[in-house]
Image (tube, rainbow, N blue to C red):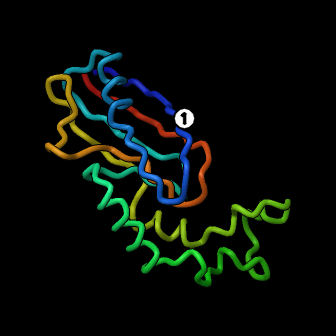
Amino acid sequence: MKVHSHVFTIETKKHMDFVDITDAVEKAIRKNHITNGLVTIFSKHTTAAVRINERESGFFDDFAEFAKKVLPCNGYYRHNDLTIRTENLVCSQGATDCLNGHSHCLHLLMGTSESVPVIDGKLALGMWQRIFLIELDAPRKRDVVCQIIGE
């Protein structure tokens, strides 16, 4: 059994950006000549999620609207309240991107990673399924780890 790891750097463009990374994952599988196994796709960030869903712009808009209702950006979050927050205080250094309590809460609902079987050298995704990195905060560079286990 072989284990291969790849890190993809992806630059997101906006809040709630759905970046389709399926082709990059498939390329890593082909590059490593994996026929059967499992691939795990993992976001190294607590404000960006990796999820499988359908690539359809109406769904992306629906999800963005849903997220606004459930976890509004301008809601009160203790994470954003610098009068009580005592940990991971990058905000004290002038950064404003740490005032993102809604993004952290949304991430806990969505998750960090997906695992997909590899069968006969291909991802075992359904007909419309794609793998997305979803930006839950402000646009920036994001690292995604793709680890393939198989033969």
Q: Nearer the viewer, residue 19 or 1?
A: 19
Left or right of 79 in this view: 31: left
Q: Amino acid at mark 1?
A: Thr
Which residue is at 38% across, 74% downward?
Answer: 66
Within 10 Å of disc 1 (Cα), the crowding (few <14, some 14-19, many 20+) is few
Question: What is the quadrant of the N terminus in the image?
Answer: top left
The residue positioned 14% from the left and 43% from the top of the image is: 127
66 horizontally vs 82: left or right: left
Q: Nearer the viewer, residue 26 or 46?
A: 26
SS under mark 1: strand
The residue under label 1 is: 9
Above or below residue 98? Residue 118 is above
> Which residue appears at 45% of the width and 66% of the height?
108
Where, by quadrant of the figure, is residue 81 drawn?
A: bottom right
- Residue 126 at x, y = what percent? 15, 44
Taking depth in this image into account, of 44 and 55 the one nearest to the observer is 55
